[in-house]
Image (cartoon, rainbow, N blue to C red):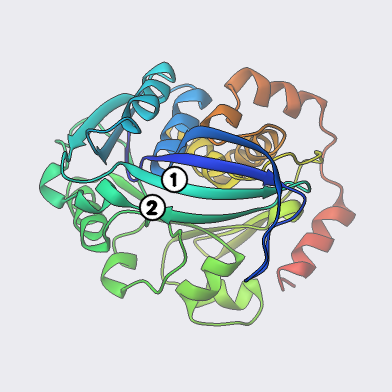
Amino acid sequence: MILVVGSANLDFVVRASHIPSPGETVMGHGFQTFPGGKGANQAVACARAGGAKTHMLAAMGADAFAPPIEASLREAQVALHVVRVPEQATGTAFICVSDEGENAITVAPGANNALEPHHLPPLQGFSHLLLQLETPLPTVTACARAARAQGVSVVLNAAPAQVLPQELLALVDILVVNEGELASVSGHNGSIAQCLERIAVPTVVVTLGHRGCCARHHGEFLVQKAFEITPVDTTAAGDTFCGTLVAALSQGADLSQSLRLASAAGALACTRPGAQSSIPQAAEVASLLAMAAPTSDTERAALRQFCGLA
């Protein structure tokens, strides 16, 4: 089983021609609300990937924003452990999505900040704990410590970007970051390969947007080319990648296979609007993989060069 401990938000999404600059007002051409939050998105991705049963621990308010999030998680067959915080609003995110599919996001954490270490359910039977950074850092660290003590693999998606204490990194088995988060965690602005060498975590995975992803696994470097798609909304791409990656690993796939599955799922999530509504089912990922051409040696070499690998 997989346990996701993290945020649950209701996303307020406006589509516009472009993301406004500071001081600029842009007229939008569409507004929708979607269940979101990094933790909840990743839990849905885990569940839709199939295989291991997915549980989620999240804190929400007693307001009108919580029910749509809970309904989405239950529809995805996620076993939900809710900490109800009546005095706090459920977390929200305000998202502007451009016509090119790029986004800018501001999060009001609300009840997510009330998640505490003592809320963690018993860990017996869980193989992986998946964490992010939209809940309090002391809670994230305490959950990782509890998982390590019981032999549960700890996966941390270090997003949103921030400097992490060594105390937390020492408890992490797999770290997943994008390029900006990699720079924050490593404290270095050199090549991806140089940044990876500065992080003392056994496995570090770096998502590279439209290029694909790379990983350092016990000293070995892996690269995976992105799947070609026309982006509509990239909001949940990274969360879909994380959830699918952990689901694949929990089912015994090796890291190379897991990166390929996660990349395909993340690509499909970019082709649809919304967060959890965009996350694909396992059959859709399998269909994309069946149609995709294998990565050529030239493409692999180009990606390795971009990452600063020999």
Which residue, given by chain and number where applicable, does mark 2 sit on? 132
- Which quadrant of the figure contains the C terminus? bottom right
Which label was assigned to residue 196? Answer: none
From what the image shows, is residue 122 above or below residue 286? below
Question: How many other residues sit within 10 Å of disc 1, few (<14), some (14-19) or many (≥20)?
Answer: many
Which label was assigned to residue 38? Answer: 1
Q: Residue furthest left?
A: 118
The percent coordinates of residue 56 (x first, y second) are 30, 34
From what the image shows, is residue 76 above or below residue 216? above
- The residue positioned 63% from the left and 40% from the top of the image is 266
Task: Identify the mark nearer the N-term, 1 or 2.
Answer: 1
- The residue positioned 80% from the left and 38% from the top of the image is 229
The residue closer to the viewer here, 100 or 152, is: 100
Q: Identity of the amino acid at label 1?
A: Lys
The residue closer to the viewer here, 43 or 61, is: 61
Where is residue 285, by image quadrant?
top right
- Which quadrant of the figure contains the N terminus? top left
Element type at marker 2? Answer: loop
The percent coordinates of residue 273 (x first, y second) are 65, 34
Where is residue 191, by image quadrant?
bottom right
The residue closer to the viewer here, 301 or 230, is: 230
The percent coordinates of residue 137 (x first, y second) are 27, 62
Whether residue 252 is visible here, answered yes or no, is no
The percent coordinates of residue 157 (x first, y second) are 44, 54
Q: Identity of the amino acid at label 2?
A: Gln
Q: Nearer the viewer, mark 1 or mark 2?
A: 1
Question: Is there CB contact under 8 Å for labels 1 and 2?
Answer: yes
Q: Is residue 19 left or right of residue 86?
A: right
Cα distance in 3D space between marks 1 and 2: 7 Å
Element type at marker 1? Answer: helix
Whether residue 150 is visible here, answered yes or no, is yes
